[in-house]
Amino acid sequence: MTILLPDLPYAYDALEPYIDEETMHLHHDKHHNTYVTNVNAALAKHPEIGEDLEKLLSDVTAIPEDIRQAVINNGGGHLNHALFWELMTPEKTEPSAALLADIEASFGSFDDFKAAFTAAATTRFGSGWAWLVVNKEGKLEVISTANQDNPISEGKTPILGLDVWEHAYYVKYRNVRPDYIKAFFSVINWNKVDELYAAAKA
């Protein structure tokens, strides 16, 4: 059993005008596919550890040292992107009452959360991600991670994530990352975020 590239849950042009079709082809078919190819190659060297990436990345010290960074980079890249596609939708969605209440309690207001998330995405130097997570205490928290690092390696459960690698936005937005971050809020799949939130809080 090898790790497979998942299909997008919508057409490549479904997120226009916010996320353009050309970027979706490059991002999914090229970048995500490369992570899948590379993590399969790494895991093939140590079949005894299995292919459960969430389990492996939740305790990276247990990954054999000769493939550890390859699994962190490429396994994380696969998990991050597989989730990212599902966190976007062309449909109009809204946070559930329970999630919205928790966001307001945690950050002060939805606008304050949006500002915190935007800041995390904007100020991530170089490549990485911005996240809304449920931490070990069951609380909501906004964080950012470098490269393809996944919050599960810190014991945190990601429920919303934004890719701020340049390949995620450069075709359409060039070097203006803040415009891409603003556009992302128009395509968030809050139904998926709610599903992840409920599972993390259960």
Image (cartoon, rainbow, N blue to C red):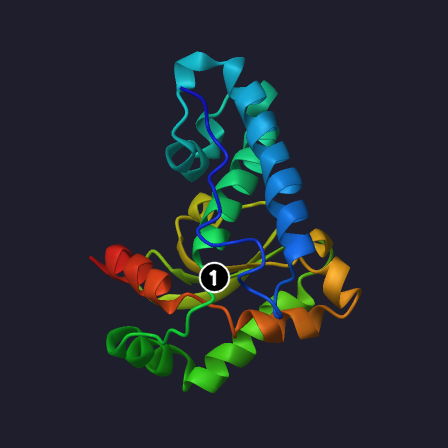
Mark 1, Cα crowd under 10 Å, few <14 / some 14-19 / many 20+, is: many
State whether residue 137 appears in this view.
no
Q: Is 157 or 40 nearer to us in this picture? A: 40
Q: Is 89 or 146 nearer to us in this picture? A: 89
Where residue 112 appears, as percent x and y from the top left, is 49, 84
Instruction: Name the residue at the right extreme.
Output: 175
State whether residue 182 appears in this view.
yes
For the point 45% across and 22% down, the residue is 2
Where residue 165 appears, as percent x and y from the top left, is 68, 54
135 to 50, vertically: above or below: below
Q: Give the left or right position of residue 144, taking residue 195 as reference.
A: right
For the point 52% across and 74% down, the residue is 186
Q: Give the left or right position of residue 56, taking residue 186 as reference.
A: left
Q: Is 118 or 9 nearer to us in this picture? A: 9
Q: Quadrant of residue 66?
A: top right
Q: Amino acid at mark 1?
A: Met
For disc 1, the marked residue is 88
For the point 48% across and 48% down, the residue is 8
Where residue 31 appears, as percent x and y from the top left, is 65, 41
The quadrant of the rendering that contains the N terminus is: top left
195 to 65, vertically: above or below: below
Where residue 175 appears, as percent x and y from the top left, is 79, 65
115 to 44, vertically: above or below: below
Label 1 secondary element: loop
